[in-house]
Image (cartoon, grey):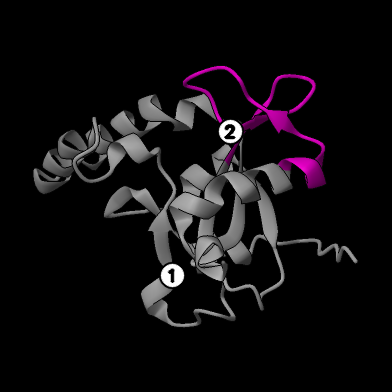
Amino acid sequence: MTFILENGRANYILFENLTGMLTGLSQNSQGGKADLKDASGLQYEVKSYPDLEAYPGDRFDLFHTAASSTFGPNNKGPVVKRLLAEGDYKGALAVCKEAGYDHTDYFIYTNTAKFQPSSPFRFVIISKADVLGMLEGHDPRLISRRRILVQCSEVVKLC
């Protein structure tokens, strides 16, 4: 059943729950809010990127970090696409903020997109302010895996 781990739709809940258990965060039952929360109410959104060792190429560097509603044919996707086509990055960013960035205090990035069972599970926690500063200049829905990973200041290996 390893294909389930490789499929983002199938593995999302599994790795979101694992991240919550490892960090002591709980599931957020409030609709329209981030995936996880801490005891003080801070909101944590879980996003996944392709593992650097399993997918080393530049082709896998940029990945989606905005709310899913801002992509493709989803609710706000056509609006963001139109704004970007018109050269209105600030307008597109405003839509992305309203759709999710403004409801999040921290982002937890896991290496579980296209997850390979031979890869160790990894995650990094980054503040919303830092994430907003790293968004791609041509599309506020995207972020660079390379820019995220250089933020790692501490590595904790769980055995």
Q: Could one spot residue 114 in this view of the protein?
A: yes
Judge by depth and name the residue closer to the eye, 8 or 89.
8
- Seen as rendered, the residue at the extreme front is 1
In-image side of 118 versus 52 (left or right): right
Residue type at tag 2: Asp
Residue 36 appears at what percent x and percent y?
65, 32
Evaluate if marks 1 and 2 touch, with contact meaning CB atoms under 8 Å apart: no
Q: Is residue 27 above or below residue 53?
A: above
Q: Position of residue 60 (x, y in %)?
A: 41, 72
Marks 1 and 2, the one that precedes in the sequence: 2
Q: Secondary structure at mark 2?
A: loop
Label 2: few (<14), some (14–19) or many (≥20) C-alpha neighbours in 10 Å? many
Residue 79, placed above or below residue 28:
below
Say which residue label 2 marks.
35
Disc 1 element: loop
Residue at 47% from the left image edge and 43% from the top image edge: 132
Depth order, front residue of 57/21: 21
Residue 58 sits in quarter: bottom left
- To which residue does mark 1 refer? 61
Tell me: 77 left or right of 104. left
Residue ID at (43%, 70%): 61
Picture residue at 55% right of the left edge, 54% below the top: 11
Above/below status of 70 relative to 4: above
Q: Is residue 144 left or right of residue 24?
A: left
Identity of the residue furthest to the right in this view: 159
Left or right placement of residue 89 versus residue 131 in this view: left
Is 43 within the magenta? yes
Q: Nearer the viewer, residue 11 or 147?
A: 11
Q: CA distance from mark 1 to mark 2?
A: 23 Å
* Residue range corresponding to the magenta coloring: 20-45
